[in-house]
């Protein structure tokens, strides 16, 4: 809520704003804040005066009392004035009680004719849509949407110059540290950047893992959700090939610390439920999708004897390592851990997985398969 005072200390009007800066104008004397000064407000101030009740909403001239003077002020120039959503002042014209206020949310200049349109240095913001009218002059510095305002985080940030938002440095931590949440801060020229905030300490007690019964429930949910695991199972069934059954396991590879899941074609996908926090169904689902994609690549390779699909391509020398790089790239693009168009995120995760294999120089292998395996992402 923002109030505008005259040079004599009288309240002219107030406004509250939506997350995208759409104002709701409240003229002085609008005691119930419905956007209009009418008989309801007149009756309310009369009641307060009769009961010797002080309420700051009625103290229009801020003299510390509510008396007949305030009732006269309320019934004067502002009586009958209606503002409300999208308006800072009536017709943007100047008067004693409704001045031509144009500068509103975050200092943005409001259009005097078309509301709620705001001029913000380099661009024009449509508050009702939460979008800019022009493409970002800086290009794709804030992502693929050139019209998005404050990277779609209007509660956390604004854009003082219409170029790039200054979002809290903790955004990366709150989003799990993923690359798409690594948002650059914007500091106006000549000003010192704000100090980095210290991320919160991790909880001292780790969350409890899934039980086997909870794991089996998640497996049924994956089968019935029509999601990424279901799509792979349907595709393989259509090819007459084994489809991945999700198996809740606490043996074999699941005894290795930290592994969330693995596949054995043509048997199934093994979910190491004891390593997955039970309050993180997204991680369960992404692990299942990731390993199911590996399963798909393995069984189609075994069953086809070679096709034009990227995973069955004859990679030549070092083919085994290149094929591993390809299936990791496809899996990390498919499972949702990275945006489907974010190569750097996919590359980082694929390289990390390949480091546990006998392959050396894994960065080169991953870059080598980018054109073939990153473009053809996901299960067919």
Image (tube, rainbow, N blue to C red):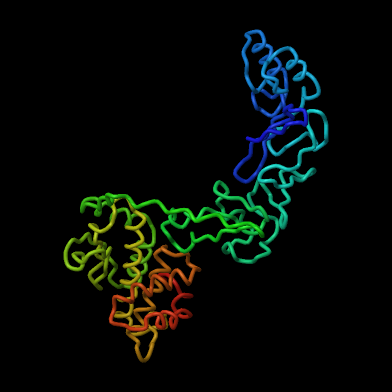
| Residue depicted at x 52% and y 53% | 168
Does 279 sit left or right of 158 as displayed?
A: left
Tell me if residue 287 comes above or below residue 150 in the rendering: below
Work out which residue is located at the far top of the displayed protein and give it.
50
Q: Nearer the viewer, residue 164 or 312?
A: 164
| Residue depicted at x 80% and y 43% | 113
Quadrant of residue 147 within the rendered picture: bottom right
Q: Nearer the viewer, residue 51 or 140?
A: 51
Work out which residue is located at the far bottom of the displayed protein and give it.
317
Tell me if residue 21 comes above or below residue 348 in the rendering: above
Q: Residue 129: horizontal and vertical position, in percent?
A: 64, 49
Q: Nearer the viewer, residue 120 or 365?
A: 120
Q: Residue 10: horizontal and vertical position, in percent?
A: 74, 26
Tell me if residue 26 comes above or below residue 76 in the rendering: below
Q: Residue 126: horizontal and vertical position, in percent?
A: 68, 49
Q: Quadrant of the N terminus?
A: top right
Does 97 sit left or right of 326 as displayed?
A: right
Does 229 sit left or right of 275 as displayed?
A: right
Q: Nearer the viewer, residue 223 or 61?
A: 61
Q: Residue 95: horizontal and vertical position, in percent?
A: 83, 31
Quadrant of residue 338 within the rendered picture: bottom left
| Residue depicted at x 38% and y 73% | 350
Work out which residue is located at the far right of the displayed protein and give it.
94
């Amino acid at each position: 809520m923002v109030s505008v005072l005259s040079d004599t200390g009288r309240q002219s009007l107030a406004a509250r704003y939506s997350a995208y800066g759409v104002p709701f104008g409240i003229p002085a004397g609008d005691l119930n804040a419905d956007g209009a000064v009418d008989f309801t407000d007149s009756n309310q101030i009369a009641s307060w005066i009769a009961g010797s009740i002080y309420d700051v909403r009625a103290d229009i001239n801020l003299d510390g009392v509510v008396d007949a003077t305030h009732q006269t002020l309320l019934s004067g120039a502002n009586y009958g004035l209606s503002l409300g959503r999208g308006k800072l002042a009536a017709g943007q014209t100047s008067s004693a009680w409704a001045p031509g206020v144009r500068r509103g949310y975050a200092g943005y200049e409001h259009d005097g004719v078309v509301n709620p349109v705001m001029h913000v240095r380099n661009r024009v913001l449509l508050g009702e849509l939460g979008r800019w009218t022009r493409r970002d002059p800086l290009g794709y510095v804030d992502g693929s949407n050139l019209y998005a305002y404050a990277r779609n985080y209007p509660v956390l940030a604004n854009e003082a110059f219409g170029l790039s938002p200054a979002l809290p440095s903790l955004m990366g931590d709150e989003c799990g540290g993923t690359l798409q949440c690594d948002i650059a801060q914007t500091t106006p020229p000549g000003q010192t950047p704000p100090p980095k905030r210290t991320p919160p300490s991790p909880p001292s007690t780790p969350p409890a893992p899934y039980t086997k019964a909870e794991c089996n429930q998640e497996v049924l949910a994956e089968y019935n959700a029509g999601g990424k695991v279901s799509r792979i199972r349907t595709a393989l069934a259509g090819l007459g090939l084994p489809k991945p059954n999700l198996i809740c396991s606490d043996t074999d590879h699941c005894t290795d610390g930290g592994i969330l899941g693995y596949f054995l074609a043509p048997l199934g996908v093994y979910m190491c439920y004891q390593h997955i926090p039970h309050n993180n169904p997204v991680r369960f689902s992404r692990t299942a999708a990731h390993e199911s994609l590996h399963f798909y690549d393995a069984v189609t390779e075994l069953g086809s004897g070679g096709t034009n699909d990227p995973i069955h391509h004859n990679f030549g020398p070092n083919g085994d390592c290149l094929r591993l790089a390809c299936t990791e790239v496809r899996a990390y693009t498919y499972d949702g851990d990275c945006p489907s168009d974010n190569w750097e995120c996919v590359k980082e995760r694929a390289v990390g997985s390949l480091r546990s294999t006998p392959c050396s120089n894994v960065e080169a292998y991953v870059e080598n398969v980018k054109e073939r395996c990153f473009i053809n992402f996901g299960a067919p």
